[in-house]
Image (cartoon, rainbow, N blue to C red):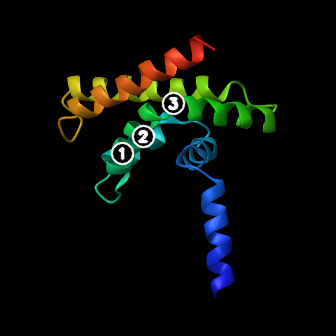
């Protein structure tokens, strides 16, 4: 049992939150509407996760960009990973704003939009300055 625990620790130390988030986005085909569904759903804790991850991403944007570069090298058929993530955040912001304007969003997402825009700005800075 201890060897399984050691193996899990090795795996968890090898992968970061960025790895897991990028793998999730890749598995969804970088589809922002899936994230939107999870954010709206009251059956998941995705909103809480996304807010925490966004804060983490803002603080660790340079490491995120490094990991994106690694994903780009491993997946030659995939276009720039960081730019795809930027597009996901941009489309997510636009979708939430549109739904809020039409009063179709289930809650006031103003603080969520602010957080997503901060991440969007960080992503733009790291993408266009490298």
Badge 1 crowding class, 10 Å Cα cut-off, few under 14, some 14 to 19, many 20 or more, is few
Q: Looking at the picture, how far across and down is residue 103, in whole percent? A: 18, 30
- Residue topped by disc 2: 56
Describe the element under mark 2 as helix, strand or loop.
helix
Describe the element under mark 3 as helix, strand or loop.
helix
Tag 1 near tag 2, CB within 8 Å: yes
Task: Establish if 18 lies above or below 109.
Answer: below
Q: CA distance from mark 1 to mark 2?
A: 6 Å
Which of the two marks, 1 or 2, is nearer to us in this view? Answer: 2
Residue depicted at 42% across the width and 43% down the height: 53
Q: Looking at the picture, how far across and down is residue 108, in whole percent? A: 17, 35
Relative to 120, 82 lies left or right:
right
Describe the element under mark 1 as helix, strand or loop.
helix
Tell which of 88 and 95 is nearer to you. Answer: 88
Which comes before the other along the chain, label 2 or label 3? Answer: 2
Q: Residue 5 sits in which quadrant?
A: bottom right
Residue depicted at 30% across the width and 23% down the height: 98
Q: Looking at the picture, how far across and down is residue 107, in whole percent? A: 18, 40
Which residue ends up furthest to the top in the rendered image?
A: 129
Residue depicted at 24% across the width and 36% down the height: 105
Badge 3 crowding class, 10 Å Cα cut-off, few under 14, some 14 to 19, many 20 or more, is some
Tell which of 11 and 33 is nearer to you. Answer: 11
In the rendered structure, find residue 52 and report the number of the disc placed on it: 1
Which comes before the other along the chain, label 1 or label 3? Answer: 1
Residue depicted at 52% across the width and 24% down the height: 86
Say which quadrant the N terminus sits in: bottom right
Badge 2 crowding class, 10 Å Cα cut-off, few under 14, some 14 to 19, many 20 or more, is some
Say which quadrant the C terminus sits in: top right
Task: Establish if 46 lies above or below 54.
Answer: below
Task: Please give the count of numbered marks on the rendered protein.
Answer: 3
- Residue topped by disc 3: 61
């Amino acid at each position: 049992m201890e060897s399984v625990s050691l193996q899990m620790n090795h795996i968890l130390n090898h992968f970061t939150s960025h790895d897991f988030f990028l793998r999730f986005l890749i598995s969804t085909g970088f589809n922002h509407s899936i994230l939107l569904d999870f954010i709206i759903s009251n059956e998941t804790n995705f909103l809480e996760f996304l807010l925490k991850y966004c804060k983490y991403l803002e603080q660790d944007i340079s490491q995120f960009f490094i990991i994106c570069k690694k994903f780009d090298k491993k997946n030659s058929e995939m276009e720039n990973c960081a730019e795809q993530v930027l597009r996901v955040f941009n489309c997510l912001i636009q979708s939430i704003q549109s739904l809020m304007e039409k009063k179709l969003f289930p809650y006031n997402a103003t603080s969520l939009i602010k957080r997503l825009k901060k991440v969007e700005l960080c992503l733009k800075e790291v993408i266009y300055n490298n």
